[in-house]
Image: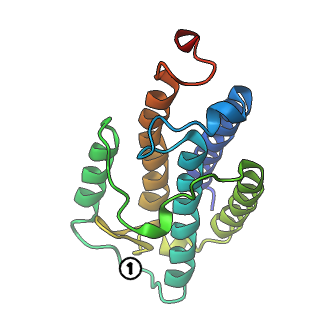
Amino acid sequence: MSDLLPLLKALSARRARLYTDMRAAGPAAYNWNPSPAEWSEAQVAEHLYRVERGVLVGLRVNLKTMKPGKGPGFFSGIRHAMFCTAMRRPVRVKAPVKAVLPEPAPDIDKLERDWDGLSAEWGELIENFDPALLKSAAFKHPIFGWFNITQTLQFMIEHFDHHRFQLKRIRESAAYPGNKSAA
C-alpha cells in the first residue's frame, strides 16, 4: 500500500541508524548500563524490536476480523495526539506490558537478524494491505486504545523517536565507554 510505505521506510531508516551508531560505538558501549535499574543501548534496541513485533502480531490477529468502515472511534485521533504529545517529551514512561521489556544482555547480532526479518514481514503486510481497511480499527494500544493502520505506524515512529531521549542520556553520561569526558 503506497500510502503506508513512507511510514515503514521512515521506521526502517531509524532502525538502520540505531544499528550504525551502536556498531560504531562497539560492544563495551552498547552493552553499558548507566545503573542497574537503567537499560543499555542494546536493551533499548531489543525493546523497540519487541514493540514492533508485538504490534505486528496484534495487527495480524485483528486483520482476520477487520471490516471496512469500522473505525477506531471518534476519540481515536485525540488519543493518538495525546500519545504523540507524551512521546515528544524527554520523560521516562514505564512500558505498559511486560512482553516488551528487554533481556538483561541482548545478543545484538541475533537481534539485528530478527529485526531485519521482522522488517520484511512488515513490508509484506503493508504491500498487501487492503486500502478499504485504511480507516478501520487495526491495533489496540494497551493505554491509548484503538488506532487505524496509519496511526499505528505513526505510533511506532513516535515511540522509536521517544527512545532517542533515552539513548542520548546514555551516550552523554560521563561514564559512557568511549566518552571523552569519561577518560
Image quadrant containing the N terminus: bottom right
Q: Does residue 48 appear to the left or right of 25 in the view shown?
A: left
Name the secondary structure under disc 1.
Answer: loop
**x, y percent for residue 71:** 35, 75
- Residue at screen point 43% across, 43% down: 38
- Residue at screen point 44% across, 36% down: 166
Q: Is residue 3 visible?
A: no
- Residue at screen point 71% across, 52% down: 107
Question: In this orientation, which residue lies closer to the viewer: 83 or 111?
Answer: 111
- Residue at screen point 39% across, 75% down: 137
Question: In this orientation, which residue lies closer to the viewer: 169 or 119?
Answer: 169
The residue that mark 1 highlights is 69
Report the number of numbered marks. Answer: 1
Up the image or down, 183 lies above or below 176; here it is above
Up the image or down, 159 lies above or below 57; here it is above
Question: In this orientation, which residue lies closer to the viewer: 130 or 168?
Answer: 168
Task: Please tell me in which quadrant of the rendered image residue 96 appears.
Answer: bottom left
Q: What is the residue that sits farthest to the bottom in this orientation?
A: 65
Up the image or down, 150 lies above or below 44; here it is below
**x, y percent for residue 36:** 45, 44
Hey, what amino acid is under mark 1? Answer: Gly
Q: Is residue 94 visible?
A: yes
Question: In this orientation, which residue lies closer to the viewer: 31 or 141?
Answer: 31
Image quadrant containing the C terminus: top right
Up the image or down, 90 lies above or below 112; here it is above
What crowding class fits label 1: few (fewer than 14 Cα within 10 Å), some (14-19), or many (20 or more)? few
**x, y percent for residue 47:** 53, 55
Task: Please tell me in which quadrant of the rendered image residue 124 appears.
Answer: bottom right
**x, y percent for residue 174:** 48, 18
